[in-house]
Image: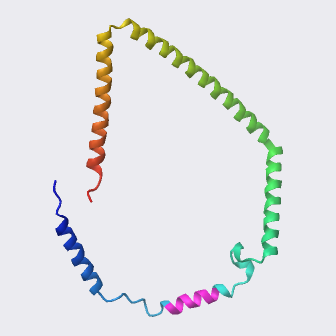
């Protein structure tokens, strides 16, 4: 498919010229007054009603210490109330996951042994045909995936 870049460029120039010919947008009449009033209202708020970054430094430090203390108390309170049971459950789940991984590893080893013996039993021609079939299947998969991807992408 051949694209007409000259036509696209002239269309872009025409659209840009039309947009530049438009008058600038005007804000609503009371917008500036409302914005300035809101800024003045926020500036008049006491420091404890503003965000923490606007607090005085001693108040910020006290807030940080109190937040850490509350976090510490909650953590150790929850630890005494049953986190040990949760840790035991996580540990047993981890042990089960490790056993499952070992079983999968054993299964993979058996499959590898089976594939090695099966390939050794097959004639060379069959091995070449299987390799050719695998390579052509992978190429077909890659080509069809590329086709679907490109057909679904919007054209620019």
**Picture coordinates of residue 128, whole percent (x, y):** 31, 16
> Which residue: 79% across, 51% down?
75
On screen, 12 above or below 40?
above
Residue at 33%, 14% in the rendered image: 127
Q: Is residue 15 above or below residue 8?
A: below
On screen, residue 1 above or below 109:
below
Which x, y percent locates residue 121? Answer: 38, 6
Which x, y percent locates residue 32? 50, 91
Q: Which residue is rendered at x = 71% and y = 73% of the image?
A: 52
Within the magenta stretch, is there residue 38? yes
Is residue 95 in the magenta section?
Answer: no
For the C terminus, the quadrant is: bottom left
Q: Position of residue 147 (x, y in %)?
A: 26, 43
Number of marks: 0
Magenta stretch in the rendered image: 32-41
Describe the colour scheme in one phrase.
Answer: rainbow
Is residue 22 placed above or below 143 in the rendered structure? Answer: below
Is 40 situated left or right of 146 in this image?
A: right
């Amino acid at each position: 498919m051949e694209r007409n870049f000259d036509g696209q460029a002239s269309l872009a120039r025409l659209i840009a010229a039309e947009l530049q010919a438009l008058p600038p947008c005007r804000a609503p009449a009371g917008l500036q007054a409302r914005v300035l009033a809101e800024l003045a209202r926020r500036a008049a708020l006491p420091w404890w009603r503003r965000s923490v970054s606007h607090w005085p430094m001693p108040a910020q430090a006290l807030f940080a210490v109190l937040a850490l203390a509350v976090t510490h108390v909650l953590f150790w309170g929850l630890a005494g109330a049953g986190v040990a049971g949760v840790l035991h459950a996580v540990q047993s789940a981890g042990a089960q996951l490790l056993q499952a991984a070992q079983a999968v590893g054993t299964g993979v080893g058996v499959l590898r042994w089976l594939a090695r013996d099966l390939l050794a039993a097959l004639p060379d021609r069959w091995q070449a045909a299987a390799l050719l079939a695998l390579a052509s299947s992978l190429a077909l998969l890659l080509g069809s995936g590329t086709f679907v991807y490109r057909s679904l992408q919007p054209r620019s």
